[in-house]
Image (cartoon, rainbow, N blue to C red):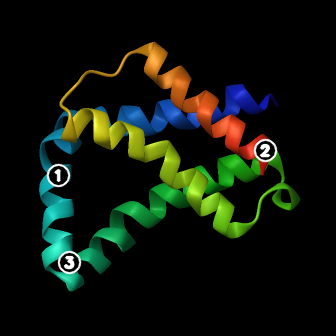
Amino acid sequence: GDLHTDVREIVLATFAWMNHDVVRRVLPDLIAESVRNPSFAQLLDARVSAPRRAVARAALLASIGEATVAERDLEFVLDIIAAPFFWRMFARRHDVDDDFINAVAHLVCLYITSA
């Protein structure tokens, strides 16, 4: 349907996952371990990152159409959906509110429509 609505749902799902009690407690440690341990990094990617990105990728492609965005751009879009939440929640230890979610969705839509 509507690009902004679809993107906002993907952004909201990303936040909901990152804000889950267990994920919020362990994600920074998992990422730190993946930097130190390449085998663990591959496992984390295969079991956590890749499946989540595949779902988000499919949802984005359903919304915008495959011809609209190149694969490298789609990978960048997936990165810019998650990165603001990680930085705000884990690096800065600030809460996320609806305005922040809307701002991330708006940023993603701007990038998609300008690419």
Q: Nearer the viewer, residue 73 or 52?
A: 73
Q: Residues within 10 Å of mark 3 (few under 14, many from 20)?
A: some
Image quarter of the N terminus: top right
Q: Is residue 106 above or below residue 30?
A: above
Q: Where is mark 2, residue-wise?
A: 114
Labelled disc at residue 40: 3
Would residue 52 be visible to someone looking at this image? yes
The part of the image, by quadrant, that contains residue 18 is: top left
Q: Is residue 95 above or below residue 61?
A: above
Residues under labels 1 and 2: Cα distance? Answer: 32 Å
Q: Is disc 1 placed on a helix, strand or loop?
A: helix
Q: Amino acid at mark 1?
A: Pro
What SS does tag 3 mark?
Answer: helix
* C-alpha gap between disc 2 and disc 3: 37 Å
Q: Give the left or right position of residue 115, taking residue 99 as reference.
A: right
Of callouts 2 and 3, the N-terminal one: 3
**Furthest residue toward bottom:** 39
Percent x, y of residue 37: 15, 80
